[in-house]
Structure formats: structure tokens, C-alpha cells
Image (cartoon, rainbow, N blue to C red):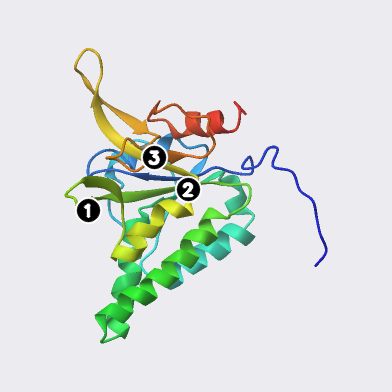
């Protein structure tokens, strides 16, 4: 093997990859409009909250659709106009893949296993897209451990895939509804775990709480660029 020395300086500035999860109605889809030049890859009919803005989207109804989208993103000149790719939601996309596997297999456990393997490849493929920001939205899972402690985290079909999700990303953020000092409700992104909500920021540049603005977060991670 030929040894090639590389530098960590500026690592990640070819695109920030974020996983954001939250309860239904928290505004995960609405966050997309704060991304720089986004296009949406949608597996659900939940884009009504974006009806007031002009954001292109592609609907995927099968794994083949998703593979075709990936090919288009990688090879199309038109796709180069989009600096951000939003998968809304990765949980729903996994449900689409699971439904296909269940239809093809009589063994439910095998279907979950095959779905998990395929989703890991899909997630890595989109996560590793060069020179693009990629936003993965996910449903929220509420788990209880053997001691009865509750933990909120990204939700996917299948226990193993759900447990694996936080390990795929450097940025795992929880979209929450919080009260400000005047008692008014607002959305905010939690960027560090408190032992109850799963979250992490490997860039080390985000505060515990950030405004619900993905463009500002991407800029902050990239040093204001």
C-alpha cells in the first residue's frame, strides 16, 4: 500500500453531515428551509410545512428510486446546483425498504436484517457525499433500560439499526420545544447529551443549545465560512 499523509486541518469543510431527530410536529421538515441551496429526498407526504417556500424535491417510493437519486446526485450537472441534500425522513425511507423486504421474504426477522444491511449502505453513501451538506431527519424513539431509565434517541425500524444510528454521524442533534425566560415556547437544537436525550457534537464548535437554523450551524462548524 502506498502511504499518503493527509491533514485533519479543515476536515469536514467539504460538507457537514447532520442527523436531527425529534417528536412528531417538532419541525424537522421546516428546518430544511434553513439549509443552503437544498433539495429534498422525500419518502413521506409531510412537506406541507414548506408550501410557502420554493424548494425542489424528489419523491422516492422504493430502494431502486433511491439508488437512481444517488446516481443523479453524483453524475448530473443539474444536481451540482444543490449544496445541501435533505433526506426527509431517513426513518420513513427505512420503512419503505422494510416493506419491500417483507414482501419478498416470509421470514420477518430476515426482512429486518436485510433492511438494516441495506440502510447502513444507504446512510454511509449519502453521509460520505463529497462537497455537500447532508441533512438526515429521523423520528424519535423512547427507550427504557433495565434500570427503568428513559432515553430519547433517533428512531428506525428494528432495534439494532436504531441503536447503530448515532454512531454513523459526527453531529446528532435533538430538535426540542423549549421555554424561553419569558415562558414562551420555541424550537431549539440540543447538541450535547444530558443523559436523557441522545446528542453529540464532534466538531466541538456548537453550544449545548443552538437556534433551529441549520445554515447557521453549518457555518459555525466551518468556522464562519
The residue that disc 1 covers is 145
**Element type at mark 1:** loop
The part of the image, by quadrant, that contains residue 33 is top left
Give me the disc on residue 39: 2
**Which mark is first along the chain, 3 or 1?**
1
Give me the disc on residue 77: none
The part of the image, by quadrant, that contains residue 186 is top left
**Which mark is first along the chain, 3 or 2?**
2
Q: Residue at x 33, y 29 (%)?
A: 188
**Element type at mark 2:** strand
Q: Residue at x 59, y 43 (%)?
A: 15
In the rendered image, the vertical position of residue 69 relative to residue 144, given as above or below: below
Q: Residues within 10 Å of mark 2 (few under 14, many from 20)?
A: many
Q: Residue at x 21, y 12 (%)?
A: 182
Callouts 1 and 3 close, C-beta under 8 Å: no
The residues tagged by marks 2 and 3 sit, at their Cα atoms, a distance apart of 20 Å
**Element type at mark 3:** strand
The residues tagged by marks 1 and 2 sit, at their Cα atoms, a distance apart of 38 Å
Q: Residue at x 54, y 42 (%)?
A: 16
Q: Quick one: which residue is furthest to the top in this view?
A: 182
The residues tagged by marks 1 and 3 sit, at their Cα atoms, a distance apart of 21 Å
In the rendered image, the vertical position of residue 92 relative to residue 12, given as above or below: below
**Which mark is first along the chain, 2 or 1?**
2
The residue that disc 3 covers is 173
Amino acid at each position: 500500500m502506498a502511504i499518503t499523509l493527509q491533514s485533519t486541518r479543515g476536515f469536514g469543510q467539504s460538507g457537514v453531515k447532520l442527523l436531527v431527530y425529534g417528536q412528531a410536529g417538532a419541525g424537522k421538515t421546516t428546518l430544511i428551509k434553513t439549509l443552503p441551496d437544498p433539495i429534498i429526498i422525500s419518502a413521506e407526504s409531510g412537506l406541507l410545512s414548506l408550501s410557502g417556500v420554493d424548494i425542489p424535491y424528489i419523491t422516492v417510493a422504493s430502494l431502486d428510486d433511491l439508488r437512481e437519486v444517488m446516481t443523479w446526485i453524483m453524475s448530473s450537472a443539474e444536481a451540482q446546483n444543490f449544496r445541501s441534500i435533505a433526506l426527509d425522513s431517513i426513518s420513513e425511507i427505512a420503512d419503505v425498504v422494510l416493506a419491500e423486504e417483507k414482501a419478498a421474504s416470509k421470514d420477518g426477522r430476515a426482512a429486518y436484517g436485510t433492511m438494516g444491511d441495506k440502510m447502513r449502505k444507504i446512510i454511509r453513501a449519502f453521509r460520505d457525499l463529497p462537497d455537500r451538506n447532508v441533512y438526515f431527519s429521523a423520528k424519535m424513539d423512547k427507550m427504557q433500560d433495565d434500570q427503568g431509565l428513559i432515553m430519547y434517541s433517533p428512531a428506525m425500524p428494528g432495534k439494532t439499526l436504531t441503536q447503530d444510528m448515532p454512531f454513523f454521524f459526527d453531529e446528532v442533534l435533538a430538535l426540542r420545544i423549549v421555554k424561553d425566560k419569558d415562558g414562551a415556547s420555541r424550537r431549539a437544537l440540543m447538541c450535547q447529551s444530558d443523559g436523557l436525550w441522545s446528542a453529540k457534537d464532534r466538531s466541538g464548535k456548537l453550544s449545548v443549545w443552538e437556534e433551529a437554523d441549520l445554515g447557521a450551524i453549518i457555518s459555525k462548524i466551518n468556522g464562519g465560512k
